[in-house]
Image: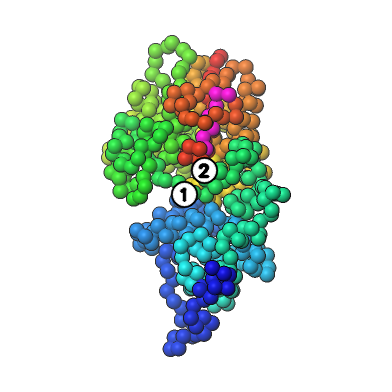
Amino acid sequence: MSPSNRAQQGRRPGAGRRPQGKPRGATKPVDPARLAAFEVLKAVRVDEAYANLVLPHVLGRLGLEGRDAAFATELASGTLRQQGTYDAVLAACIDRPLAKVEAKVLDVLRLGAHQVLSMRVPDHAAISTSVDLTRSKAGQGPAGFVNAVLRKVTRKSLEEWVAEVAPAREKDHDGWAAVAFSHPRWVVERLAEAVGRDQVDALLAADNVPPLVTLVARPGRATVDELGGVPTPFSRFGATLDAGSPAAITAVAEGRAGVQDEGSQLVAIALAEAGLDHDEARAESWLDLCAGPGGKSALLAALAAQQGAALVANERQPHRAGLVLANLTDRTSGSQVDGSAGVVAGDGTRPPFKDGTFDRVLVDAPCTGLGALRRRPEARWRRASADLDVLVGLQRSLLDRAIDLTRPGGVVLYATCSPVLAETNGVVQDVLEGRSDVTLEPILATVGNVPDSAGPIDGTVQLWPHRHGTDAMFLALLRRTA
């Protein structure tokens, strides 16, 4: 279809004329699904909320279910994922910098651009509902502005816009990829360094595909059969859902199962299955040093119970420690689940434990989160390259302290939800070079059998969204030798 025809198709009959008999100043009711998406974007922008956490609350408050809830979810999440691309398009359609556009009006423009360029919404519907939303939130003047800008957006397809506003791919690949795949340039560069330039486009594209809902059956408390869905290929405790709400599954509602990416499940499995290098017969003590919000702790506690061990969960932030406690509490009896030895609110770099206390320690370190952009699309816009220096220093401190807390012969599993080499290879190598009482050991058993998962150091594991359908989890196993 030609640009002129697209523009004509998107124009409503009588646009620009006030309908006869309608009082001046009266507004149309706002579509609830689009209002929900707008409120999610506002919460992400103003409160630094995570879209996947705030969305269920917004849907519930507005009473959205079924197709309306699905539409609102795709509109909010898709807009956040493609924000970089849409901002480049909008900048070409507006005669002033985007920073000069009122924030809530820019939110509506982004939502409208997603409908026009990436959803099966007729142009006229995307424009008229965006105008109604703007009028209700910002007034008549901004509504006219939104109408004019979105009409310009409809003149080209997404592919045509990318070809116009992005740098030439053959001259500046990273600049082109930043626009085409909606990632900050520095993120493109770091991911290319980690995965290789021949695969970075596939990784960036995978970051923009909404992941399936993945569940975990906590062993001894639930079975995979109870979850329905399709068993996950690598974790024997997981299943994916094609549709439906996890909360409708009895085992999830009762806390015997939960929502957890398969990569995160493999982290817990790798620690639980690692062999210990001592012959002493005693009940093992395990530690999750950075436990919030508690998903891995819940799986670890279940695995510990099966081995006659007990897990202590440590979390620095008190409110997150409360989330961990909830994950480790039986919802029927109100008591802690088997395998849990309690939750402690403590600084992982200065934890309230004696050295040499634990047989197995998990360091699921705070990181950039660039391995989970499918699930948390807004994270790509919140991080900056400068964050790496602070995070890497913290990661080294946490791994060092975890080794101190481990008994000789015991193991530490260092994991990040980031493939960035500074957070993976860099941290592990620095700690190994600075200590004589620890060695790096290959990760075997279930996790070691995942194909095409070799990490940046021999024996480590790196999972990828485009290869394995998981978050980009990095895993390294270290043994305390003395």
- Quadrant of the rendering where the N terminus is positioned: bottom right
Between disc 1 and disc 2, the foreground one is 1
Whether residue 26 is in magenta: the answer is no
The amino acid type found where label 1 is placed reads Pro
Question: Is 209 on the left or on the right of 93, as rendered?
Answer: left
The residue range painted magenta reads 458-464
Q: Is residue 28 above or below residue 353?
A: below
Count every numbered label the image shows and give the total: 2
Question: Is 97 on the left or on the right of 47, as rendered?
Answer: right
Q: Quadrant of residue 22?
A: bottom left
Q: Is residue 275 above or below residue 323?
A: above
- Quadrant of the rendering where the C terminus is positioned: top right
Q: Position of residue 253 (x, y in %)?
A: 31, 45
What's the residue at 45%, 51% (across, down)?
53
Q: Which residue is mark 2?
A: 372
Please indicate, yes or no, whether residue 174 appears anywhere in the rendered image: yes
Q: Which residue is mark 1?
A: 210
Task: Assign the magenta stretch its main secondary structure.
Answer: loop
Please indicate, yes or no, whether residue 255 appears anywhere in the rendered image: no
Q: Position of residue 398 (x, y in %)?
A: 57, 31
Distance, label 1 to label 2, CA atoms, is 11 Å
